[in-house]
């Protein structure tokens, strides 16, 4: 596989890899490192990529494994919590603050989910993968993915209702 073929194969899902790594590692810098490491490994094994039916699913699985390894490493204690910046032009300051608070709350609620639910909600609701693709990435049955996603959404929905009803977590 030459460089052009490699880039055509792996570049379409570069942003998904980064967002997935960011969801798991939280830090932009760590997610960039994970993305770079993944592409380095893919490049070194570019001839083997032809053997995979779904290179994107393979790459996402590699990303998940790399991120889990990073989190288990000694350097994981150096990871910092950095939330996404949500910017909206032309909105009032009150609206911007309220929107930022809501986005931060949803991010926090996702972070508090069990690891498997967190990954599934990232892959399905944010990255827009199909159930079969997620099942392949995580080596689970599609029905298990649907159940886990349903539970994750229900947990987030209940926590949001509780937050908005009482104003206190």
Image (cartoon, rainbow, N blue to C red):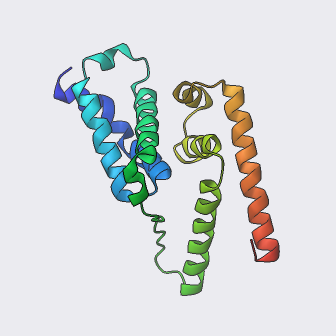
Quadrant assignment, res 53: top left
Q: Is residue 93 above or below residue 149?
A: below
Quadrant assignment, res 46: top left
Q: Is residue 30 above or below residue 47?
A: below
Residue displayed at 62% across by 31% down: 131
Quadrant assignment, res 121: top right
Give the image location of residue 9, x and y in percent. 31, 28
Residue displayed at 17% across by 28% down: 3
Give the image location of residue 32, x and y in percent. 32, 51
Q: Quadrant of the C terminus?
A: bottom right
- In the rendered view, does 161 fall on the left or right side of 10? right
Residue displayed at 74% across by 35% down: 147
- In the rendered view, does 158 fall on the left or right side of 50? right
Between residue 49 and residue 94, name the one nearer to us: 49
Q: Quadrant of the N terminus?
A: top left
Between residue 51 and residue 8, name the one nearer to us: 51
What residue occupies the far top of the structure in this picture? Answer: 51
Between residue 82 and residue 71, name the one nearer to us: 71
Give the image location of residue 130, x and y in percent. 58, 32
- In the rendered view, does 71 fall on the left or right side of 132? left
What residue occupies the far front of the structure in this picture? Answer: 74
Give the image location of residue 51, x and y in percent. 35, 13
């Amino acid at each position: 596989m030459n460089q052009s073929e490699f880039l055509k194969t792996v570049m379409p899902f570069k942003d998904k890899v980064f967002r997935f790594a960011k969801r798991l590692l939280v830090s932009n810098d760590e997610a960039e490192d994970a993305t770079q490491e993944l592409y380095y490994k893919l490049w070194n094994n570019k001839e083997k990529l032809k053997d995979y039916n779904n290179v994107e699913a393979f790459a996402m699985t590699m990303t998940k494994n790399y991120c889990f390894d990073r989190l288990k490493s000694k350097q994981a204690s150096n990871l910092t919590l950095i939330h996404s910046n949500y910017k909206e032009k032309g909105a009032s300051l009150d609206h911007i603050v309220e929107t930022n608070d809501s986005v931060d709350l949803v991010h926090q609620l996702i972070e508090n989910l069990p690891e498997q639910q967190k990954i599934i909600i990232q892959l399905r609701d944010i990255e827009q993968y199909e159930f079969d693709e997620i099942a392949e990435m995580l080596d689970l049955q599609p029905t298990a993915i649907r159940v886990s996603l349903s539970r994750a959404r229900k947990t987030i929905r209940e926590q949001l209702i509780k937050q908005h009803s009482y104003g206190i977590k």
